[in-house]
Image (cartoon, helix red, strand yellow):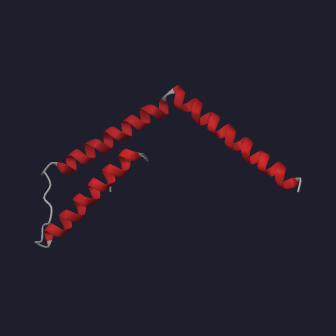
Amino acid sequence: MLRTNTSFSNVAITLMDLFYGVTEGVAATGRSVLEFRPDLLKTIRGLAAESNALLDEIRASDRYKTARRKEKERSEAKAKLGDDTNQSH
């Protein structure tokens, strides 16, 4: 399987890779049900690489880093609030 980052594109790329692999395995038995373009695997790899590059670019942005920091701070505050509530009961 190809390495892709978690995202909606990951689902599509993983399904294409799965169908390609299953079809290739079935074709080896002589019972081909689907036929894909000869360059499909190369296309899937290219899509996965592009998806990974875009996600890396997003994660490197200041906006993303700020949002992640705020999300972490909120989670920590929520956890602390939960701990304080549990201790008072």
Q: Residue at x 19, y 63 (%)?
A: 23
Residue 53 lies, with reference to residue 21, above or below; the image says above
Q: Residue at x 65, y 40 (%)?
A: 72
Q: Position of residue 34 (x, y in %)?
A: 15, 61
Q: Is residue 39 left or right of residue 79?
A: left
From this viewpoint, which residue is outermost toward the top? 62
Q: Nearer the viewer, residue 45 or 75?
A: 75
Quarter placement of the N terminus: bottom left
Quarter placement of the C terminus: bottom right
Q: Residue at x 49, y 28 (%)?
A: 61
Q: Position of residue 55 (x, y in %)?
A: 42, 37
From this viewpoint, which residue is outermost toward the bottom? 29
From this viewpoint, which residue is outermost toward the right? 88
Q: Is residue 3 visible?
A: no
Corner quadrant of residue 48: top left
Residue 67 lies, with reference to residue 8, above or below; the image says above
Q: Is residue 75 visible?
A: yes
Residue 51 lies, with reference to residue 11, above or below; the image says above
Q: Is residue 44 left or right of residue 86?
A: left
